[in-house]
Image: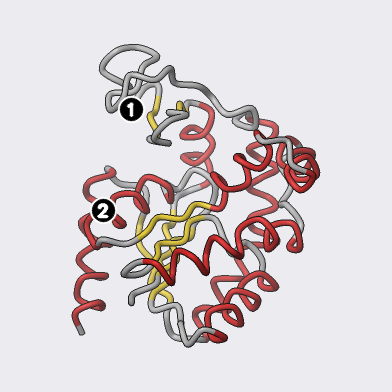
Amino acid sequence: MFNMLIMGPPGAGKGTQAQAIAKRLSLKHLASGDVVRAEVGGKTVAGQKAKAYMEAGKLVPDDLVTSMVGSHIKTACESGNGVVLDGYPRTVAQARSLTELLERDGLKMHAVVNLKVPGEALVDRLVNRLTCPKCNWVYHKRNNPPKVEGKCDKDGAALASRPDDNETVIRERLRVYHDQTEPVLAYYRERSVLQEFDGSGAIDEVFECVVRYLENLKGA
């Protein structure tokens, strides 16, 4: 069983890298954002509460996040070779809750990867981001466009911009990240599981650096 977490600011490429890592290492990719959006789309009570925070660029409160993704994390850890968590935890309180959840079942977080990208590059990535609603693959309008305009290369689904991918909301999300999520890095650094990588390069280059580290760690 090998469990890992991928971290970084909005637009750092966490989701793209997490999907590729999960495939290479035969792990389950669990993106809290997808879980939350599914709850919002399903118009559940928790989802409706979360929607207001997301549209304003705010973090969804800890209790809401825990209620929506906690059971998914446990199921993913129990049913496979391990899990790649993406987008959770986003606060120190969530990180502590996750540690407690894993330890109750004799599990732990083996690695935490943090992708570092300069602020203005993040804004550009997010303003120009297009996402496939079926497979969640991410494109950039200029640097990584789909082969057919507006359609996913993998499944042909119509690509869309997320409602919160506008500059005003993006800058607020980055501010919230620095204030509330960056302290999580210190939490995992103290637990000696944090490794940081430059996430500003090409997707494939970043992936090879990260997965090489993880394969060595997993095989140790």
Identify the amino acid type marked 2.
Lys
Q: Position of residue 204 (x, y in %)?
A: 22, 46
Q: For the residue labelled by badge 1, is the local secondary structure a helix, a strand or a loop? A: loop
Q: Residue at x 24, y 62 (%)?
A: 25
Residue indicated by mark 2: 23
Q: Residue at x 43, y 30 (%)?
A: 134
121 left or right, relative to 204: right
Q: Position of residue 105 (x, y in %)?
A: 51, 84
Q: CA distance from mark 2 to mark 1?
A: 24 Å
As drawn, the residue found furthest toward the top would be: 149
Would you place residue 48 above or below residue 1 in this image?
above
Would you place residue 43 above or below residue 100 in this image?
above
Q: Residue at x 31, y 24 (%)?
A: 155
Would you place residue 183 above or below residue 171 in this image?
below
Of the numbered discs in the image, which one, if any, rests on residue 46? Answer: none
Residue indicated by mark 1: 143
> In which image quadrant can residue 81 be found?
bottom left
